[in-house]
Image: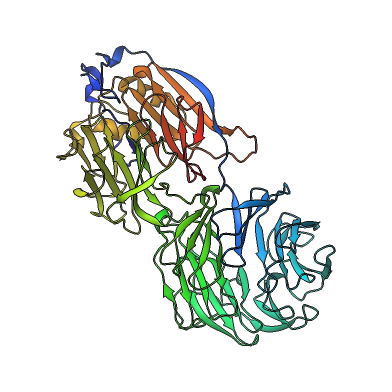
């Protein structure tokens, strides 16, 4: 059974050879096990005729572009994004649309002291409900809204950008409503407001861009300065101070420094009387300098940059999320939690298979909480019932589905690895990816490793773990459908990838070495790169060059494909998938080249256009691509699995939220 296998970008030598280019090719096994005969002389094959077409994605799954989330109880929560407001009454298992204003909403607030009051906003527009989302009113501000918060069903506050600027935080304005949001009046301030939070109908706090924290005890009529976060010598004032009131006397402040590249230093302060603010957590980074506010010796916060923060109403409990933009998806976010007012903090493990972009977090108790990831424009809501030690996806799907890669053996049988909350899960589908179930676990994945899966039959498959640490990249094999995994080889170098053409010929390669198998992975031998020099591909094409370098690409299309690659003015190709006499080549993130019919035909599939014309179609990201023949293939778009049955002309979502 010939099996298409993925080749991901490899940093291999530019001088490569195709030793079989001038030789007679032997018969190959087709995907269904029958024999197909390739051309005897690839030199005589003409250059493929390239047809340029536009691929389309049909349908749109729930979960795209969800921007913010808040829960008011263990059962009731809200989520905004994609021009709509969603509500759940069963802890996130099911959401329904309660407002569809046609405005792209970006943020959301549900005040602890008035849990029936919800404010959602985006651009200049805010939507307000005081009956748990049953009805909504709209108000348009003259400038962009930064925050909206209600202390009672009548009294609310909003922070907007100043009249002269639509960006930045140096000239923001404070507004107040006393009639539930029907009318708003601008209030004078002594500084540019950044955040506001109420712990009771009359007592609340406000932060400013200069590092000040102000308090009101009369529902916002008068604000008094109670704290000044010190600005360290040589450093700018904090980029943000987000406030989180837990009661009439307790408030937390997450203070973020300016943020450099993928790192951001931060501190957490806490008050029990509104006047004295005590540092309880801090993170200093090499890229962003010391933690802001001179916190001194306090516990170290998670991640390399601050994520969202949540507090539990009426308690001493708080949770802080950290993120690491430079880490892999399997190790990009973690949390720290305290139950004793910040005296001690737990350091929970990295959230397995988090999307990498935590945008909202909400906890109703120290054990039960939700985290909204929004990586690649797709919202994934995770829930924990044990304080962050483990997580499960509750939106958009409540059933397992792979997020680290897939490998299909036929047009219906496939395998996947990793689910949100469990990086080690091994899954199987019997219906082309529509639904999945967990059948086991793969070997332990390190915190900075990425994984590639390659199944050749129902029983036999391989895993390649790519680690940035030398000698830590590994190849595993199973011969019993994942019940047991044996270590095949520990590889030197990094950027390690694995590919098979057919069921016998395969190659594992890194930036410095290549290993070849011709017996289905039972034995591997190193490839002498220096001896392979008769066929040279351009230096910008190392992914394709790396495959031909192994002399395992016994396909008649090899010669024409090489010429075709050389003639394309696109960017560096990053992936290659084999399926008998079919090759899928990704020149960039906007499409791919599909070469068929022994190299005589080629389709340049351009970037996808959404059939619903909503303007929110996903791009073809190409994290994983798997073709089993010229027509049937799968790929990732964001966190969604797409399937084509017509060679890339149209794609549909293989896994469905309600499956």
Q: Residue 410: x and y, percent?
A: 34, 31
Q: Residue 558: x and y, percent?
A: 31, 23
How many numbered dots are placed on residues in this image? 0
- Judging depth in this view, the residue of 337 and 79 nearest the camera is 79
Who's the residue at 53% across and 50% down the image?
Answer: 396
Question: Residue 487, relative to residue 533: is it above or below?
Answer: below
Question: Residue 505, relative to residue 261: is it above or below?
Answer: above
Question: Residue 613, relative to residue 397: is it above or below?
Answer: above
- Judging depth in this view, the residue of 341 and 429 nearest the camera is 429
Residue 15 in view in this figure: no
Residue 567 in view in this figure: yes
**Quarter-of-image position of residue 253:** bottom right
Q: Is residue 266 left or right of residue 537?
A: right
Q: Residue 129: x and y, percent?
A: 74, 61
Q: Residue 578: x and y, percent?
A: 33, 29
**Quarter-of-image position of residue 468:** bottom left
Q: Is residue 145 left or right of residue 178?
A: left
Who's the residue at 79% across and 56% down the image?
Answer: 138
Q: How is the image coloured?
A: rainbow
Residue that sits furthest to the front in the current view: 90
State the quadrant of the N terminus: top left
């Amino acid at each position: 059974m010939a099996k298409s296998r993925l080749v991901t970008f490899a940093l291999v030598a530019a001088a490569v050879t195709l030793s079989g280019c001038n030789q007679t090719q032997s018969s190959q096994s087709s995907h269904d096990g029958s024999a197909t005969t390739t051309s005897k002389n690839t030199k005589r094959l003409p250059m493929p005729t390239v047809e340029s077409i536009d691929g389309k994605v049909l349908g749109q799954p729930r979960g795209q572009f969800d921007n913010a989330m808040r829960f008011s109880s263990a059962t009731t929560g809200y989520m905004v994004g994609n021009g709509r407001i969603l509500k759940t009454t069963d802890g996130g298992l099911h959401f329904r649309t309660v407002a569809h204003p046609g405005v792209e909403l970006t943020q959301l607030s549900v005040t602890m002291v008035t849990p029936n009051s919800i404010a959602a906003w985006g651009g200049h527009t805010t939507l307000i409900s005081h009956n748990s989302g049953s009805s909504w009113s709209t108000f348009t501000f003259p400038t962009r809204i930064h925050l909206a918060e209600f202390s009672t069903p009548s009294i609310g506050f909003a922070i907007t950008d100043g009249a002269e600027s639509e960006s930045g935080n140096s000239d923001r304005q404070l507004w107040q409503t006393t009639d539930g949001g029907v009318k708003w009046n601008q209030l004078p301030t002594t500084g540019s407001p950044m955040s506001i939070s109420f712990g009771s109908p009359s007592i609340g706090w406000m932060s400013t861009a200069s590092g000040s924290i102000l308090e009101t005890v009369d529902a916002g009529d008068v604000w008094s300065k109670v704290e000044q976060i010190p600005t360290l010598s040589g450093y700018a004032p904090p980029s943000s101070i987000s406030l989180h009131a837990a009661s009439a006397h307790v408030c937390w402040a997450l203070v973020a420094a300016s943020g450099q590249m993928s790192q951001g230093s931060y501190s957490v302060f806490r008050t029990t009387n509104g006047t004295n603010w005590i540092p309880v957590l801090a993170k200093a980074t090499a890229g962003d300098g010391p933690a802001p506010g001179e916190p001194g010796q306090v516990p170290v916060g998670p991640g390399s940059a601050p994520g969202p923060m949540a507090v539990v109403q009426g308690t001493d409990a708080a949770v802080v999320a950290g993120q690491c933009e430079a880490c892999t998806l399997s190790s990009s976010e973690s949390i720290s939690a305290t139950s004793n007012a910040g005296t001690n903090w737990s350091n929970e493990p990295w959230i397995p298979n988090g999307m990498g972009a935590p945008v909202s977090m909400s906890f109703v108790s120290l054990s039960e909480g939700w985290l909204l990831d929004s990586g690649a424009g797709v919202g994934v809501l995770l829930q924990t019932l044990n304080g962050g030690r483990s997580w499960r996806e509750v939106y958009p799907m409540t059933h397992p589905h792979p997020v680290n890669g897939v490998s299909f053996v036929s047009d219906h049988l496939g395998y996947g690895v990793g689910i949100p909350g469990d990086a080690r899960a091994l899954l199987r589908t019997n219906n082309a990816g529509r639904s999945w179930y967990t059948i086991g676990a793969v070997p332990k994945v390190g915190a900075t490793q990425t994984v590639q899966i390659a199944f050749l039959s129902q029983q036999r498959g391989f895993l390649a773990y790519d680690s940035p640490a030398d000698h830590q990249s590994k190849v595993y094999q199973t011969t019993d459908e994942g019940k047991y995994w044996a270590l095949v080889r520990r590889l030197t170098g990094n950027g390690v990838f694995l590919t098979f053409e057919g069921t016998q010929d395969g190659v594992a390669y890194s930036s410095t070495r290549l290993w070849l198998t011709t017996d289905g992975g039972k034995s591997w031998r190193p490839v002498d790169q220096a001896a392979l020099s008769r066929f040279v591909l351009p230096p910008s094409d190392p992914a394709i060059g790396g495959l031909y370098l192994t002399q395992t690409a016994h396909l008649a299309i090899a010669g024409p494909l090489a010429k075709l690659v050389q003639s394309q003015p696109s960017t560096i190709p990053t992936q290659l998938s084999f399926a008998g006499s079919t090759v899928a080549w990704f020149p960039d993130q906007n499409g791919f080249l599909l070469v068929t019919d022994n190299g005589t035909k080629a389709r340049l599939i351009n970037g996808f256009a959404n059939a619903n014309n909503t303007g929110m179609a996903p791009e073809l990201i190409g994290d994983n691509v798997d073709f089993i023949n010229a027509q049937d293939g799968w790929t990732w778009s964001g966190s969604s699995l797409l399937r084509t049955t017509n060679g890339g002309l149209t794609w549909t979502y293989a896994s469905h939220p309600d499956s």
